[in-house]
Amino acid sequence: MKAVCILGSPRADGNTAAVLNAVVSELENSGIETEIIRLGDAKIGFCTGCKTCDKTGECVQHDDMGRIMSKIYAADIVVVASPSYWGDVTAQMKQFIDRCTPFCNNNANRQPIPTGKCGAAIAIRAGQNKKENEHLLATIEHFLGHLDIPLQHRFTIEGIKTREDLAGRPAELERARAFGREIIKHVI
């Protein structure tokens, strides 16, 4: 069994990465082969809106999207994690989502993504407003839905601005590990 985790944070050592790592540790402890793809390290161009993918099912750009999508095609579990930047997913995540247009289920010429995958979403924010995190989760659910990957698990943490904030709330990392165990129950 394989899991691919898409990290939308531009920070490799930020709070979202720490929470995702807690989830990944549980997946790996259960024998699931797991890979984290950090969008901040990926070479992904902006969608140009040329609509060529509507005709060909492929993007005219050749960058890291093909590599990332091949991992999503091969995965049983797809975890998407983003911190809240101005009440929405990060620019890196939005750029990635935009470039998934060739794989969207409303593209008649796409190569369909295999069914039976489990989708999970993680949203982290500095503020206390959980409603804004719900917006991020809805964005991720909408995105995964267009890839025909049902969102089956959601996780949010609010009030985490610095690494010290997260370190001072060890129960949140335990909750993240429990979230990982919930994903495992669903797929095993």
Image (cartoon, rainbow, N blue to C red):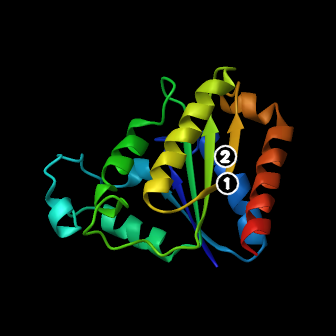
The residue at which mark 1 appears reads as 21
User: Residue visible at 55% across and 40% down?
Assistant: 138
Q: Which of the two residues, 2 or 143, is positioned nearer the viewer here?
A: 143
In the image: residue 108, left or right of residue 137: left
User: Residue visible at 18% across and 46% down?
Assistant: 49
Does any portion of residue 83 appear in the rendered image? no
Q: Quadrant of residue 57?
A: bottom left
Q: Classify the position of the C terminus by image quarter.
A: bottom right
Q: Classify the position of the N terminus by image quarter.
A: bottom right
Disc number placed over residue 18 in the picture, else none: 2
Q: Label 2 sits on what residue type?
A: Ala
User: Residue visible at 17% across and 46% down?
Assistant: 48
Q: Quadrant of residue 30?
A: bottom right
In the image: residue 159, left or right of residue 102: right
Q: Which of the two residues, 75 or 20, is positioned nearer the viewer here?
A: 75
Q: Label 1 sits on what residue type?
A: Asn
- Packing grade of label 1 (10 A; few <14, some 14-19, many >=20) is some
Q: Is residue 149 above or below residue 99?
A: below
Using the numbered discs, state the Cα–Cα distance from disc 2 to disc 1 in whole angstroms.
5 Å
| Residue 47, x across and y down, in percent | 23, 48
